[in-house]
Amino acid sequence: MEIQPSGLYELLAALPAQLQPHVDSQEDLTFLWDMFGEKSLHSLVKIHEKLHYYEQQNPVPVLHGAAVLADDLAEELQNKPLNSEIRELLKLLSKPNVKALLSVHDTVAQKNYDPVLPPMPDDIDDEEDSVKIIRLVKNREPLGATIKKDEQTGAIVVARIMRGGAADRSGLIHVGDELREVNGIPVEDKRPEEIIQILAQSQGAITFKIIPSIKEETPSKEGKMFIKALFDYDPHEDKAIPCKEAGLSFKKGDILQIMSQDDSTWWQAKHAGDANPRAGLIPSKHFQERRLALRRPEILVQPLKVSNRKSSGFRRSFRLSRKDKKTNKSMYECKKSDQYDTADVPTYEEVTPYRRQTNEKYRLVVLVGPVGVGLNELKRKLLVSDTQHYGVTVPHTTRARRSQESDGVEYIFISKHLFETDVQNNKFLEYGEYKNNYYGTSIDSVRSVLAKNKVCLLDVQPHTVKHLRTLEFKPYVIFIKPPSIERLRETRKNAKIISSRDDQGAAKPFTEEDFQEMIKSAQIMENQYGHLFDKIIVNDDLTVAFNELKTTFDKLETEAHWVPVSWLHS
């Protein structure tokens, strides 16, 4: 509803009474009466009404030079015999406030609102730089800008502006601006480190004298790109970073929001969900890949001790023990697999939030862990907890079926020729040979479990994980990690490990060698493939580990998780 200006005064007077039913306390009501009853407010409203009424009359100025006319009148009156009226008029015309009022009248009448500037000097140097004085208030937070010395001119220039920092929020300092003074201290002969020290010691207002950059900056869009960090990073340990204080530290698995990729070497990022708008420097993907590849040893892939373990017909990946090992192959594997692992340097992976929809298949759950860590026991407890919800794959084998076994239950029994044909056609995720018989997990066996609207629990070697990371399976990888060797000795002293060293797979007590091997194997797995793990669960106490695993599954099915962008946009 539009309020007529003439009724504004009346509305103001009636407001407290109209608002009374909606006010909770007498204190608030008194405040409203005092505020709306203020004489100065009433005067302002009256002036507003008068001006608005006058404006509606479309007034036209009688003359544009009232100030000049007043001066002429004063000069004329000086030559007249001075009586009391003339003296009073001259006194009025000489008052500064009257002169100012007449000057404003003329400005409005002429609609000439620009300030009167002094004329430009004739002897100005065309090459002279324009200098800008900037005053910023800096609290405990960093200024949010980095500087460098121009190698050609020796000038100190602004190298980058950190998104969300004090300098960026001010909008007064730009990349390429030349710094001349900081708090009145000339910086031409100083090193960038000395200037940074001056800034670090300054609190409150900081005054900069700069020469603005002539090149125009292209406005950069707010970062909508999110990445998962696949390595740990501490800027204070990075000798290459231009400013350690401007760096952003993060851990493997952290989700970062990229705010700027303007610099090909140093990106600007912040932790996803961080309320602080200020970005920090992180090494770019290309730069990090390059220096990690140079740092990485040539031989990195180390064979893991694996064992073909059995547990009441409960299936597992095909791990062959160190003494019995013949082959342990994965689909896609070739002679260059070791080189691929070395070249595949983990840095960042672009990710996006994903929540499973009701009509979608469940995500494949991949369990990884060293021999003896208790992975199969955890998997069995999950199956028993809800046989309708969880399922496992049925492996293939070329060995003869035993009397108590059923085809398609313990194993799918096939001929050696058919098995080798399937290997050639890349139908196996993993396969191995033991005592002249093949054993393998097929891709179709995984699809079969998922097609039954069940969560498929798959136990594979860690190097197989990267081949499963597809749009179809969207795997969630859980690493079952052993506790310290002291805890292993304490908690596993009465436990037994199922070995493949005889055909019956007899359970034997853990040896010190088994403990050492388990710890070593886990370290190798985590070092080489840790960037592929979504969750790490330490199996110190089986019940505690199972509860953590169950909670993880519940969240996986109900909450949003970060997944590679490629899984949703393939």
Image (cartoon, grey):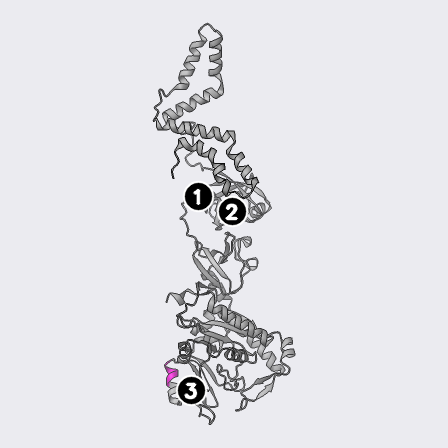
- Which numbered disc, 1 or 3, marks the residue that appears first in the sequence? 1
- Which numbered disc, 1 or 2, marks the residue that appears first in the sequence? 2
Tell which residue pokes out farthest to the top in this image.
81
Res. 166 mark: 2
Tag 1 secondary structure? loop
**From mark 1 to mark 3, how far is it between C-alphas?**
74 Å
Residue 166 image point, x, y percent: 51, 47
Name the residue tied to disc 1.
Answer: 213
From the image, which quarter does the C terminus lie in?
Answer: bottom left
For the residue marked with disc 2, what is the amino acid? Ala
State yes or no: residue 548 in magenta.
no
Q: Where 398 sits versus 125, above or below?
A: below
Residue 64 image point, x, y percent: 37, 21
Res. 355 mark: none
Q: Nearer the viewer, residue 113 or 346?
A: 113
State yes or no: residue 423 in magenta.
yes
Q: Nearer the viewer, residue 429 or 549?
A: 549
From the image, which quarter does the N terminus lie in?
Answer: top left
Residue 209 image point, x, y percent: 51, 39
